[in-house]
Image (tube, rainbow, N blue to C red):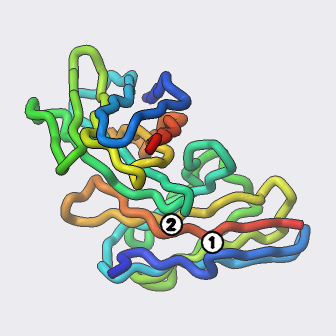
Amino acid sequence: AQTVTQSQPEMSVQEAETVTLSCTYDTSESDYYLFWYKQPPSRQMILVIRQEAYKQQNATENRFSVNFQKAAKSFSLKISDSQLGDAAMYFCAYLGNTPLVFGKGTRLSVIA
Amino acid sequence: DAMVIQNPRYQVTQFGKPVTLSCSQTLNHNVMYWYQQKSSQAPKLLFHYYDKDFNNEADTPDNFQSRRPNTSFCFLDIRSPGLGDTAMYLCAISGPSPPDTQYFGPGTRLTVL
């Protein structure tokens, strides 16, 4: 079965600085999708970024970018110019031939 | 505009008293999901519909049922809630483009007393 591991339960970053959240996964599938979701205190799950495994180019959405290393099964999220509104729980998720599999999440605090 | 709408946003019920949570979508996407998320945990898939085809996860308690009367609406029925069912319930949709990406509603926070 596919598993997703987020090894950092909590992280903090100074406002305007850059932070990287790590995610690794285990799979034997060759075709799959990876996601980062943000869950602020409101508990709404918000899609941050999406990566297709067959694309070598790393996905980017404004201040958010990923470092996708398929051979290493690694999918880290970089947040540049961190803002107070970035404070949230971040979930890494894998989608292959089975339903969406979530990691346990990383709680990000942003310090003013 | 919200794509996924959940009602109510907050629900308090008594132990054993049936409760129904609703989810509606404005995009007519063909797949709808129900997740349970307990405090400080990742969401856990309960079941999903692909059009009218119902797919139940193996470890979803029998106490949890679902109905999808049409493309736009999906309901989660908890027949006899227990204290352990206190959680956030998230509805999500995915559709044709991109077919793989799930979009979530704001959730219903259920408290069982």
Which residue has dot 2 on it? B91
Disc 1 on helix, strand or loop?
strand
A80 vs B61, nearest the viewer: A80
Quadrant containing the C terminus of chain A in the rendered view:
top left
Q: Amino acid at mark 2?
A: Cys
Q: How many marks?
A: 2
Residue lying at 26% horizontally and 42% vertically, measured from the top left = A81
Q: Are marks 1 and 2 in contact (CB under 8 Å)?
A: yes
On screen, residue A42 versus residue B79, left or right, reads left
Relative image position of residue A55 (x, y in whole percent): 11, 35
Q: CA distance from mark 1 to mark 2?
A: 9 Å
Residue A98 image-quadrant placement: top left
User: Tag 1, which chain?
Assistant: B
Residue lying at 54% horizontally and 31% vertically, measured from the top left = A10
On screen, residue A39 versus residue A81, left or right, reads right
Q: Amino acid at mark 1?
A: Leu
Of callouts 1 and 2, the N-terminal one: 1
User: From this viewpoint, is residue A89 visible?
Assistant: yes
Relative image position of residue A56 (x, y in whole percent): 9, 30
B34 vs A22, nearest the viewer: A22
Residue lying at 43% horizontally and 67% vertically, measured from the top left = B32
Furthest residue to the top?
A72
Relative image position of residue B64 (x, y in whole percent): 70, 63
Q: Is residue B13 above or below residue A14?
A: below
Relative image position of residue A45 (x, y in whole percent): 45, 57
Q: Residues within 10 Å of mark 2 (few under 14, many from 20)?
A: many
Q: Are marks 1 and 2 on the same chain?
A: yes
Residue B59 image-quadrant placement: top right
On screen, residue B17 versus residue A94, left or right, reads right
Which residue has dot 1 on it? B76
The label number, if any, that marks residue B29 in the structure image: none
Q: Is residue B13 above or below residue B39?
A: below
